[in-house]
Image: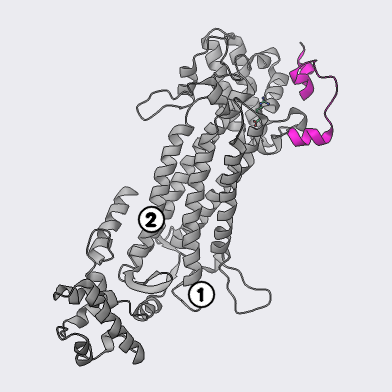
Amino acid sequence: MSSNQFDKKSEAWSALFSEPMSDLVKRYTASVSFDQRLWQADIAGSLAHADMLAAQGVISAEDLAAIERGMAQVRHEIEAGSFEWKLDFEDVHLNIEARLTQIVGDAGKRLHTGRSRNDQVATDVRLWLRGEIDLILSLLSELQLSLVEVAEKNLSVILPGFTHLQVAQPISFAHHLLAYVEMFARDAERLTDVRKRTNRLPLGSAALAGTTYPLDRERVARSLGMVDAQGHAQICQNSLDAVSDRDFAIEFTAAAALVMVHISRLSEELILWMSQNFGFIRIADRFTTGSSIMPQKKNPDVPELARGKTGRVVGHLMGLITLMKAQPLAYNKDNQEDKEPLFDTVDTLRDTLRIFADMIGGQLNPSTGLKEGGITVNPQAMEQAALKGYATATDLADYLVKKGLPFRDAHETVARAVKAAVEHACDLSELPLNVLQSFHPQIDKDVYNLLSLRGSLNARNTLGGTAPEQVKAQLARHRDRLK
Ligand code: ARG
């Protein structure tokens, strides 16, 4: 066969095909417009496969050298933007192989020995996703660090904690931010776990049943870095499963959807906090836009969009999981539909995490060594809000319990005191002692320490609580963990 017989895709299969595809069907079946982003993984996988074929004596050393030379040129052309991606070659795999064969001739045609696009694409997607997971893990750390830094800068700030969006109890602002650090830390754990199952080698499974060539799959796994923490090669153990498994993509998207859900909850709070009615924070102008009609507006577009994009990523999870439902073994072309949702999930998550780390924590000013342009906190507004809504009522009940009342009775007594305070339009701490004593004679003047915001916080000094001592301990733990 001369190399120019591989100029069109239909000729890439065989002479079996008696009619060409229409342009519409060509576009319908092709993936090259989106899967070309896998090119680096595709070349890496091919080089590892070729190296192993030569080591096993399946291809000659000369063929390997030609493949390596040709692939270097392909890489160069793609990087330079001069590589011509052709719809006729359907996908990234056939495009690269066709160009390789154009450059080096028969050696290029030997590359596909003992391999199918089925194990090839599964390998490529895994390799690519592994790199993206690593990047996302580092972005998750950066976002956590931003939150930790803002928490440290605002250690003494108090805001109302809410349940049902009704003022519940006063809490430390740092404690509130650290709740998100916990979420993102769990996200990182989940992604680290997904990475383990992503980093396994399908190559060597060929189309579905394995291959007749004496392949050394362990060698390929090692050269692609598909090893566990102990250095054991990670290889898919069943050829049918290897070519059809997309669990890793679903798991990744599920973990990504959960990150976005956490981002979305944070967004919702940022949006509330920066509304005029709260006035707790400001975000830098570069994350807001104005209104074309109302000159006074600064809208929180970035957090709103992040909240919206969460729906899109959750949708990708539904798309992927439904894609796999009812597919018979082994590979089916349905699987080509895994790429766009997966790619868009990665892009959306990556951009969102980058923007949020900056929006919360700001950017490093190299001349001062400090971060600038993160969220601005208004401690007075937060504290004023915490003083509304009888946030320390539970503290009064706890006080009475310590004097011997059963909690339920204390609860009822305080409810009556709150009712009186509401009628007088004042806070519990503003009721005179004789009025408080009219609800229970054992109330003494030391009660006023507890009815203050700081007294209420200090009293919640159990592990994981909002007392300053606990919050400082958590900050130290996160600092240490994120080093
Ligand atoms: N472009 C294809 C995909 O993304 C590659 C695998 C094609 N395999 C096949 N037997 N048609 O899934």
Find residue 181 and name its label.
2
Observer-nearest of 317 and 116: 317
Query: x%, y% of residue 397?
Result: 23, 76
Relative height, residue 281 to residue 70 (above, below):
below
Taking the spot 14% from the left edge, 76% from the top edge, the residue there is 403
For residue 10, side relative to residue 195 (left or right): right
Residue stretch in magenta: 2-29
Quarter of the image holding residue 459?
Answer: bottom left
- The residue lying toward the viewer, choosing from 470 and 208, is 208
Which of the 4 image quadrants contains residue 293? Answer: bottom right
Residue at 63% from the left image edge and 29% from the top image edge: 75
- Residue 147: x, y in percent? 40, 59
**Looking at the image, residue 193 lies above or below residue 203:** below
For mark 1, does the 10 Å Cα neighbourhood hold few (<14), some (14 to 19), or many (20 or more) residues? Answer: some
Can residue 476 be seen here? The reply is yes
Q: Indicate left or right for 106 with 405 as reference.
A: right
Residue 20 falls inside the magenta stretch: yes
> In the rendered view, would you say 361 is above or below 254?
below
Q: Label 2 neighbourhood size at 10 Å, few (<14), some (14-19), many (20+)?
A: many
Q: Are marks 1 and 2 in contact (CB under 8 Å)?
A: no
Q: Tell me if I can see residue 452 in this picture.
A: no
Residue 85 as seen in the image, left or right of residue 253: right
Q: Position of residue 152 (x, y in %)?
A: 33, 63
Q: Is residue 212 magenta?
A: no
Quadrant location, ligand no. 1? top right
| Residue type beneath disc 1 | Ser
Label 1 sits on a secondary structure element that is loop
Q: Earlier in the sequence, mark 1 or mark 2?
A: 2
Identify the residue under disc 1: 275
Disc 1 to disc 2, C-alpha distance: 23 Å
